[in-house]
Image (cartoon, rainbow, N blue to C red):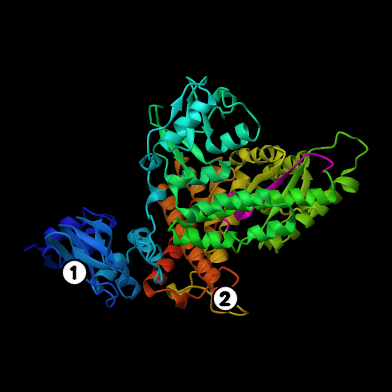
Amino acid sequence: MSTAPEIVEFLLGHPPFTALPPAEVERAAASAEVEFHLAGTVIFSQGAHPSEFLRVIRAGVVEIVHDGRVLDVIGVGEMFGHASMLSGLPTGFAARSAEDTLTYRIPADAAYRLLGQPATLRHVTRSLLQDRYGIRQGRTDEVDRDRLSQPVAALIRSPAVVCHPATPIREAAQEMSARGATAVVIDLGPSLGILTDRDLRSRVLAAGMSPDAPVSAAMTAPAQTVPSDRPAGEVLLDMLDMGLRHFPVLSPTGSLLGVIADSDLVEVQTHSSFSLRREIARATDPAELAHVAQALRPTVVSLHRANMAPLDIEAVFSIVSDALTRRALEFAAAEVGKPPVPFAWLALGSQARREAVPSSDLDSAVAFMKPDDPNLEVDDAIRPYFSQLATRATEILVACGFHPDTHRTSASDPLFVRSLDSWQKAVRSWLDDPTQDKALVLTSILADSRPVFGARVGESLATTLRPAREHPNLLRMLARFSLSHRPPTGFLGGLVVEHSGEHRGQLDLKEGGALPIVSLARWAGLAAGVLCASTPERLRAASDAGVLVPTAADTLIESFELVSELRLEHQVAQLIAGTEPDDFLDPSELSGLTRSYLKEAFRAVATVQQTISNDMSLS
């Protein structure tokens, strides 16, 4: 029979217990019981009463079974039964010993204390909010739960079809057909080319190219490649962003391992986002575009049901939003006329950071080139044009289901329509004198800017902010500005909710949850020399640059992920119910433990804010 010291030693060797103080683990181990299950024993049944124990496998193997189908096999050191115990819901699956198995059974009271530590925030919250086995509110269809987190090399189905540049297209196509491949890789020596089935249709058949022509005449070169260890979910986002469907996969030494296609990464739910982008490009008028856009929100629901990570879903939503924005601008330009000068349309805010959700507003700005014609006055000709363009594009996008910005951070406002030269002069003046009216607000807005349409001047504008890290006065004021956004922690550890209006008693997950972290990450990113990027990317870069200590960056990232999960979970539920998504959550709808984790996350953010304030003497 195992003793408490043996149990403590074992638990401390396996996550999430490895992150806990030994004293806490010792306290839980003192109440743990040892269970022995013969092979084939049902440890608990599907749909049984909420679990009263957390179980950890000491020896043996346990099968997770749903409707008679084995969904997973877990082994030594893994825990089970905790999701039902923590949520108070009936067990969503059965647990059955696949062989003679020994488990440690920890009673709920001790397990709550053990799993209620800040160090287990990320691990346990994911257990509560993510449906590991695809069993969500009675849903039982198969979900390939781990595909998007695996290294992309693990999803390669077969060796690549490779040919010489002089190979006739006919032979390459025959080899593709014989091997069941959708692409052929062309060996160009120092680089690779690629010819896909889509290329055969569009570049060969449709263009009337001879099938006896060499593949080099129709290939794309150099091919966009991907390293073998890149997570499949990130590769999917790259495909969406670049409009590509095939990537050759390279080993660390640069050798070709195979070709990954979009269909290899995800099933039909995620694949629909590719189809959606195609339909957006094919829309012939604003009405058809609005009709196509109706599929965006159901796509979010499908991705959520497919267990895609919330931040990845936000990135997909943002990328599709980019495509809708570009098409809306094309239609608007066709109506109001050709632009008088080259310009870039800049996405701002969450869309620029690729963190947009269905409730997000549309923020935008325009940067245009100075006219070559000295008689073309900016105020008389150029600004009115872009005001018309922005107004009409916004109307089209609102018809597509987006929300216009309520704070007038829009290209329809003259404040956000300037020449590139004017923007750059303004940015330089803000760097030198951040005390100017609106300098901090506008710097923060431009720090979250990304060109999505038009000329490349938007990239030039972004680089103007890079010297911000060399301006301590600006960074100091931005730090103080970011600290003005406080998480909703109240007296006695409560959550601050709305006290009046239609959202009385509800928690604002955007203003109180996401914004304090986003603001800190923006300041820290600028201090580290990072321009527009996602919030986690900025925090990691700030940690690497020494702007934030690693523990602070990790705390902020984990808290941001938790808020994002809750926010998306809430909005998906609203979409399923047919109501308009928002960021107002009733805390009473959460389980007691989830509320405690949310409070812990907010307190952790507040602690980081106070540390930064003290370190920079901002109090």
The picture quadrant where one finds residue 249 is: top left
At mark 2, the secondary structure is loop
Number of numbered tags placed on the structure image: 2
Tell me how far mark 1 sits from mark 2, CA to CA: 47 Å
| Residue 343 belongs to the span the image colors magenta | yes
| Residue 435 in sight here | no
Nearer-the-camera pick, 210 or 413: 210
Q: Looking at numbered disc 2 in the image, what kind of residue is underneath it?
A: Glu
Q: Looking at numbered disc 1 in the image, what kind of residue is underneath it?
A: Val
Rendered location of residue 92, percent (x, y): 32, 70
Rendered location of residue 234, percent (x, y): 47, 45
The residue at the point 54 percent across, 27 percent down is: 222
Q: Which residue is mark 2?
A: 498
In the rendered image, the vertical position of residue 544 relative to residue 63, given as above or below? above
In the rendered image, the vertical position of residue 249 relative to residue 316, given as above or below? above
Nearer-the-camera pick, 298 or 215: 215
Rendered location of residue 36, percent (x, y): 11, 65
Rendered location of residue 556, percent (x, y): 46, 55
The picture quadrant where one finds residue 493 is: bottom left
Q: Which residues are magenta?
A: 339-356
Label 1 vs 2, first from the N-terminus: 1
At mark 1, the secondary structure is strand
Q: Residue furthest right?
A: 375
| Residue 348 in sight here | yes
Nearer-the-camera pick, 472 or 27: 27
Residue 42 tag number: 1
- In the drawing, does residue 207 fall left or right of residue 156? right
Contact, CB < 8 Å: mark 1 with mark 2?
Answer: no
The residue at the point 52 percent across, 27 percent down is: 170
The residue at the point 49 percent across, 53 percent down is: 270
